[in-house]
Structures are given as structure tokens and as C-alpha cells.
Image: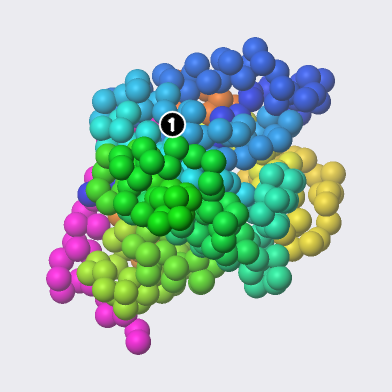
């Protein structure tokens, strides 16, 4: 069975770019943000009722334009977890090259308890320079564009160290750390002397207090409700080192790529996972990301996608892609619907059209990579609530069953591709 998640990018709605300009900075419009967050409650409850596996949201800061307001995914997912019954909730994800790993470990562990284990963890490396460079400055990180350059390597090193710190905090009774990035305790060589050492030595975790009476380790509490810890997703644009890392760690890579790249990464993941001793099938523990927009006719679906997504595509995604390549910072003044329509028609990540068209497209893709998870993106609240719910309901009833058949067949012993050595 395909596990369907909705990725929520809380977006401040505007009739058009002129209104967004007139209300600048619309990202600080408290009244509209309040309405969006309240509407998210209804969207999440609908996801629960429709049988989705989970909902997630992002960590993004400083979106004054109103496009992706996600400065604290932990608070949103905790809220959503308390108003649903079966749905899994989690951030996809915490940008671990700019986060405090102990705070993240504590926050997710509490969420795991509040939801009785209905949560997952999600980590990302951070690709938006504007905020990753600012918030991550004290760690020495900068946004990554997966180009293999110095900033990319530093970002990866910080990311992997901090994710490991989260895992250690979840699985070890007490932890210590002595690297250029972190000292636990601080200062590491001296330990911490001004503390109720006698009580901690008797009542705390073994080893927290050394023979010299100083704090030498710390115990991160609480431990997760799920043992050893909740499922871990990692966002990826197709970086081979990231996919291999996920395979070794048993994490779930979430592909923001076309299907050709996704299928290639699927084999890379399978190789790495099996080499690390994980017994999995092709497509298992992997997620494919798709922008969804359905309509009674193809033209209706494209028109709806243009209404809800064209502006963010033009002003945000396109420019980020160019910035990542260190190309121009502005696009030519062609803001017509035709430019967006070309993106939709050519992109494998955009599943836009009638039910039959989208089903056929996704079936072809799942035949290439029978992913266990499908992450759907709808730009609520630029897209109205009733439209989002209709799309999800229709997808679950009329498209997901066809994908379920493919993944079920792919799990049969004789249907798993042999990984190249």
C-alpha cells in the first residue's frame, strides 16, 4: 500500500501579485496568517478522515512575500497531532545544518508522546540562502546547492553530525560530545562544577557525574515513545551522497526529482541499504514528491494550477533554481500563463490533469519506482480549502488504488531488481 502524505506549505493567499504588492509585506499580515492556520486545522482533519498516512510541513523563515510560512514546524505538527486520531504528523523537515540538535531531539520526542507514536521525523540540509545563512551562522553553515563545493561539504558535515546527535539523544541514556562544533558538557575538558552533583550521581543517568564530582555527560529527556525512534525522512533533490547516506542509516529519502532521476536514486538507495544490512525491496522506504491538481477537463486542471501555483512558480521556484546555479536574480518580464503551462506540461513532478490523465502518468512513474510513500503538495491557502479537500479525496479514491497494485507486486520476492554491484 502506498502511504500518502500531504506536505503543507502555509501560504498567505492573495488575488494576484498586485494585491500581494499592495499589502506588502503580506507575510506579516497577522489577520490573514491567523485564518490560514485555522484553516490548516480543517485541512488536517480532512486528511485524517480521508485515510492519508500523514501530513507534514516545512521549516522556512523570513518569507515576507507570503509564499511558505513555516518558521516553527514543531508547533504546527504538535497542534495537528492533538486534533487528529490516526494521521501521522511531522516536519519535513527540520533544517539540521541550522538547528540545535538537542532541542530538535526533545521536541520530536514530546510530539511522539503527545500523538501516542503517530509522528515521524524529517530532516533537510537547507537550500535557501536568505535564512539558512543567517540562522546557521553560529554553526558556520551556509545554504547548500548540492554542487560539491566548499559550502556544500561544510553543510553536509554539520548536517550529518547534528542528525547523529539527535539519534544519540534518543537512544543513549546519556551523551557526550567533543568536536569543533559541539562540546557536551561545556567546557568539555573541565566539565561543569556548579551543579547538584550528589543528587544527580544518585538519581540521574550513570556516568553523568564523573569521579571528580563534575558533570561529564547529560541525559536528554524524554526518550521517544516509539522505539528506538520515529521514522526519519530526509528531503533530497537527487544528491547521490544524500541517497547513500539515507540507505546506510535506514532513513526514508524524499525525492524532489523527475522519475528518471528518482528511479536511478532508487537503485542507489537499494545498493547502499543492502550493503548496510537492511533487507528491503526496490522502492521500499522511499518517497516521491508530486504537485497535484485535478480537474474535470485537462484545461480546467491547468487553469486551476495556474491560479494557485503560477505566481509562486514564477517568483520563487524558478528564481531559486537560477540562484542555485548562480545565474540571474530576475526573470524576463514574461509573466503570462503560457510560461507556467509549459512547466506543467513538461514536468514529471507536476501531476496536473483529469483523473485518467494523472492516474496514467503516476502509474507509469510507479512502474519505474514503486515508492512506498507519496508526498503530495498543494499550496493551501492560495488554493482554497474545499479545492484541496476535493483533490485529496479524488486522489485517494480514484488514483491511489492503482499505485497500491504496483507497490504490492513490487514487494514480491521475484520482482525486486538485482542491485548492481
**Viewer-side residue, 320 vs 160:** 160
Task: State the image quarter where residue 62 is shown.
Answer: top right
- Residue labelled with disc 1: 77
Task: State the image quarter where residue 89 is shown.
Answer: top left
The structure residue drawn at horizontal position 26% and vertical position 73%, both measured from the top left corner, is: 277
Identify the coloring: rainbow
The structure residue drawn at horizontal position 78% and vertical position 19%, both measured from the top left corner, is: 23
Task: State the image quarter where residue 397 is shown.
Answer: top left
Magenta residues (range) = 392-421
State the image coordinates of residue 59 (x, y, percent, origin top left): 57, 40
Q: Secondary structure at mark 1?
A: helix
The structure residue drawn at horizontal position 32% and vertical position 74%, both measured from the top left corner, is: 276
Q: Is residue 407 magenta?
A: yes
Q: Is residue 220 magenta?
A: no
State the image coordinates of residue 375 (x, y, percent, origin top left): 42, 46
The extreme left residue here reads 413
**Viewer-side residue, 385 vs 227:** 227
Amino acid at each position: 500500500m502506498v502511504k500518502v502524505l500531504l506536505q503543507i506549505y502555509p501560504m498567505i493567499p492573495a488575488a494576484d501579485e498586485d494585491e500581494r504588492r499592495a499589502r506588502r509585506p503580506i507575510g506579516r499580515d497577522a489577520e490573514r496568517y491567523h485564518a490560514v492556520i485555522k484553516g490548516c486545522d480543517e485541512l488536517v482533519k480532512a486528511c485524517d478522515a480521508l485515510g492519508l498516512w500523514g501530513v507534514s510541513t516545512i521549516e522556512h523563515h523570513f518569507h515576507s512575500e507570503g509564499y511558505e510560512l513555516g518558521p516553527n514546524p514543531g508547533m504546527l505538527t504538535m497542534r495537528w497531532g492533538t486534533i487528529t486520531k490516526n494521521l501521522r504528523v511531522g516536519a519535513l523537515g527540520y533544517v539540521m545544518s541550522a538547528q540545535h540538535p538537542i532541542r530538535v531531539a526533545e521536541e520530536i520526542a514530546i510530539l511522539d508522546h503527545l500523538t501516542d507514536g503517530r509522528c515521524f521525523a524529517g530532516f533537510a540540509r537547507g537550500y535557501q540562502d536568505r535564512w539558512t545563512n543567517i540562522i546557521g551562522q553560529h554553526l558556520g553553515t551556509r545554504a547548500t546547492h548540492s554542487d560539491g563545493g566548499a559550502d556544500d561539504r561544510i553543510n553536509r558535515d554539520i548536517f550529518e553530525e547534528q542528525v547523529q546527535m539527535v539519534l544519540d539523544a534518543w537512544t543513549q541514556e546519556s551523551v557526550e560530545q567533543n568536536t569543533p562544533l559541539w562540546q557536551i558538557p561545556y567546557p568539555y575538558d573541565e566539565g561543569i562544577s556548579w551543579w547538584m552533583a550528589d543528587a544527580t550521581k544518585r538519581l540521574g543517568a550513570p556516568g553523568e557525574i564523573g569521579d571528580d564530582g563534575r558533570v561529564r555527560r547529560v541525559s536528554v529527556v524524554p526518550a521517544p515513545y516509539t522505539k528506538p525512534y520515529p521514522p526519519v525522512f530526509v528531503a533530497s533533490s537527487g544528491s547521490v551522497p544524500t541517497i547513500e547516506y539515507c540507505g546506510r542509516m535506514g532513513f526514508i529519502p524524499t525525492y524532489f526529482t523527475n522519475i528518471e532521476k528518482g528511479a536511478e536514486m532508487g537503485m542507489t538507495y537499494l545498493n547502499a541499504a543492502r550493503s548496510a544490512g537492511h533487507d528491503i525491496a526496490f522502492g521500499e522506504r522511499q518517497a516521491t514528491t508530486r504537485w497535484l491538481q485535478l480537474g474535470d477537463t485537462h484545461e480546467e486542471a491547468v487553469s486551476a494550477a495556474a491560479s494557485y501555483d503560477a505566481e509562486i512558480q514564477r517568483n520563487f521556484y524558478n528564481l531559486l533554481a537560477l540562484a542555485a546555479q548562480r545565474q540571474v536574480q530576475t526573470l524576463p518580464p514574461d509573466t503570462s500563463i503560457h510560461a507556467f503551462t509549459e512547466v506543467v506540461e513538461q514536468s514529471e513532478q507536476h501531476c496536473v490533469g483529469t483523473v485518467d490523465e494523472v492516474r496514467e502518468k503516476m502509474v507509469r512513474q510507479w512502474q519505474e519506482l514503486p515508492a512506498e510513500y507519496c508526498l503530495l503538495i498543494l499550496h493551501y491557502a492560495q488554493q482554497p480549502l474545499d479545492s484541496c479537500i476535493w483533490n485529496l479525496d479524488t486522489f485517494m479514491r480514484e488514483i491511489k488504488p492503482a499505485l497500491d497494485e504496483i507497490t504490492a507486486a513490487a514487494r514480491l520476492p521475484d520482482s525486486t531488481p538485482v542491485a548492481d554491484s
